[in-house]
Amino acid sequence: MKIYAKHVLKSFLGLFLLVFFSAVAVFLIIDFAGNSRVWITRLPAERTAYYINYLPYIAYLVCPIALLLAAVFSVGNLAKHFEIVALRAAGLSVTSILAPVFLVGFLVSAAMFVLQDRVLPDANQRRFQIQEPGDGMFDGSDPRERFNYLYTAADATLLYFQHYSGQLRSGTLVTALRLKNGSPELRVDAHTLQWNDTTGWSFLSGTRRAFRGDSVVTDTFTEWKLPGFVDPPADLLDTRAYPDEMSLAELARRIGVLRRNGEPASALRTHWHFRFASALVNLIMAMLGALLAVNSVRTGLARNFGIGLFITFLYYVTLRIGLVLGENGGLSPPLAAWFGNLVFLPLAVTLWWRAARA
């Protein structure tokens, strides 16, 4: 690595780590102080578990801002001391000078993508489980419970539940209907449908009707298994009800289940695409901060810092607008997820062009 690249990288990384850990600490302190009346009634182990599982999400939130601030101040400091002028006089382009900053932004984006897919879903689920029972915003409803629930199995069997619990993995007052060429072939009415990790699904205390031409054969049972019905409980109603609790693979599986059952899947499809788009926020923040500050000798570091924060605010608002439009079906899921990046791409290109020409 070139000496100038090491110098730029050292300055940028030092500021990034300082801002990042400071922001995480401030976030934790403010959150704990704001919820102290709730946490004072909880066990210490519960408080500790909550904030341990909250840390990955805090890192996800503050990382783009830390990259922006580190880029603005580290590159601005280089420009203030005319180091960038000297490097450009030596024949280096703006892209070459800022390459270490861009590289760190890219690596952080890759790390955040892995964090969102491998760490955040489990951490968010544990955090939600700790938070919900005593959360004042919790309205008492549970997305893991369904009433009058209709489900289409992978083998095309139709199941109707008067009540189904995703956490208990069981349903009550269940009707299963299997069709053949549009006509009923089998109907099962049972008091309970229960999942067992060893034996699978079992219908308990019910009646079975087999339709054979114009006749119906009826019998009762205490316990019975429906051949071909092997859908896992997560397909019926996943205990991970929120997109933030699901990995990309779990989101894709849930989207497939919703489509099979004729339910809208635009919200989950938008979140699936948003996983890729949101990871790039870190790279874009690093680029915007560096490109804004590269000419701070003429424009002023404080001014560029203010512009950078304003752009960041608009960027986050645009991302959320796109996400909401995708969830509501106003835009196609891929376009909604990438809406913010597509809007700000011309700005990044313009700043790069101006920095290169200056």
Image (spheres, helix red, strand yellow):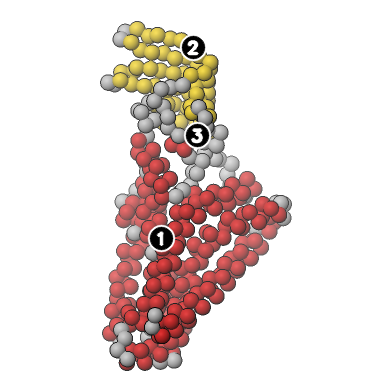
Amino acid bearing label 2: Thr
Q: In this rendering, is residue 67 above or below 178?
A: below
- Helix, strand or loop at label 2? It is strand
Amino acid bearing label 1: Ser
* Neighbours of disc 3 within 10 Å: few (<14), some (14-19), many (20+): some
Pointer 2 residue: 220
- Helix, strand or loop at label 1? It is helix
Residue at 28 percent across and 79 percent down: it is 353
* Neighbours of disc 2 within 10 Å: few (<14), some (14-19), many (20+): some
Q: Quadrant of the C terminus?
A: bottom left
- Mark 1 or 3: the one toward you: 1
Report if the CB atoms under discs 2 and 3 are less than 8 Å apart.
no
Q: Where residue 203 sits: x, y (%)?
A: 49, 22
Q: Quadrant of the N terminus?
A: bottom left
The answer to whether residue 76 is seen in the rendering is no
| Rendering quarter of residue 290 | bottom left
Q: How many marks?
A: 3
Pointer 3 residue: 146
Q: In this rendering, is residue 86 above or below 336?
A: below
- In the visual, does 82 lie left or right of 171? left
**Residue 278 numbered tag:** 1
Q: Where residue 59 sits: x, y (%)?
A: 52, 63
Give the CA distance from mark 1 to mark 3.
31 Å
Q: Where residue 291 sits: x, y (%)?
A: 37, 79
Residue at 50 percent across and 51 percent down: it is 121
- In the visual, does 37 lie left or right of 295? right
- Mark 2 or 3: the one toward you: 2
Amino acid bearing label 3: Arg
Report if the CB atoms under discs 1 and 3 are less than 8 Å apart.
no
